[in-house]
Image (cartoon, helix red, strand yellow):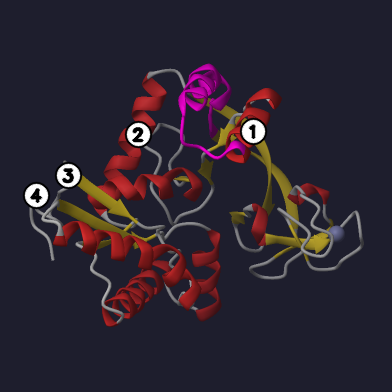
Amino acid sequence: MRYLVTSALPYINGIKHLGNLVGSMLPADVYSRFLRQEGEEVLFICGTDEHGTPAELAALAEGIDVAVYCQRQYELQADVYRQFGLSFDHFGRTSAPEHYELTQHFYQSLDANGFIEEREISQMYSLTDARFLPDRYVEGTCPKCGYGKARGDQCENCTSVLNPTDLLEPRSAISGSTDLEVRQSKHLFLRLDKLSPEVEAWVEKQQDWPNLTKSIARKWLKEGLQSRGITRDLKWGVPVPRAGFEGKVFYVWFDAPIGYLSITKPGPHRPRGATG
Ligand SMILES: [Zn+2]
């Protein structure tokens, strides 16, 4: 028996508080140490989840390149965990070349099996910033409660889920510019609806799940799984290897879970069998 132990990949943005460490890393560390003492073969991995808009916005606020920002944050986080004595065999990153390769491999495999669909969607474009604005980059007045600083994905005042085009007097979170227009942009969608029967059969097979977890899963399946957009008009992220998608990247929610596998995978950063 060989054991792979992973703890939740911390987001690159900000130094984590003690609760993160106690809640997700400490139990995994204790379990890994116990297994090693028992003479078992264990690989304990973790790493930083580095893509998405919060990292981009934080780098922008500091006026530095997002890759430089992530490098610095990675070193800070890795150092904190070292100082606490966590016994990771490897602490990796989702900005590593191995991660890019594996994410693209998953995409290509999904595409070859008919689970990817191209769609054209309407998105906010900022003429001043010369770029498409992801949901969180658009701010404005909430149409439901009138809160003036609602974001394009959600109003934090009344918790309404929004689309950027719902906002009144929308403006760019980058420049504050109101010079915005709606433009068409091509994106890839993961056909979760096609996977529904398989997922349902798998959920029903699970013996150890708490009842509540199972009932939530059943409720979602009953409502019908929706196709989800897996690409974004951003520069920071895993590039999309498809004609017509130059300058786009995979959405962080698509690539981050693959981090558990890419950080585990042997490669130049972690030769097979090497730990420490
Ligand atoms: Zn609101």
The residue tagged with tag 2: helix, strand or loop? helix
Q: What is the x, y in percent for residue 37?
A: 15, 62
Type of amino acid under label 4: Arg
Q: Is residue 54 left or right of residue 5?
A: right
Identified at 74% across, 51% down, the residue is: 164
Q: Which residue is mark 2?
A: 106
Identified at 54% across, 22% down, the residue is: 200
Q: Nearer the viewer, residue 168 or 258?
A: 258
Marks 2/1 in contact by CB < 8 Å: the verdict is no
Marks 4/1 in contact by CB < 8 Å: the verdict is no
Earlier along the polypeptide chain: callout 2 or callout 4?
2
Earlier along the polypeptide chain: callout 4 or callout 1?
1
Type of amino acid under label 1: Ser
Q: Nearer the viewer, mark 2 or mark 4?
A: 4
Earlier along the polypeptide chain: callout 3 or callout 1?
3
Q: Which residue is mark 3?
A: 2
Marks 3/1: CA–CA distance: 32 Å
Q: Under 8 Å from ligand 1: the CB of mark 1?
A: no
Q: Which residue is mark 4?
A: 272
Query: Alpha-carbon neighbours of circle 4 within 10 Å: few (<14), some, or many (≥20)?
Result: few
Marks 4/3 in contact by CB < 8 Å: the verdict is no
Q: Nearer the viewer, residue 24 or 47?
A: 24
Earlier along the polypeptide chain: callout 2 or callout 1?
2
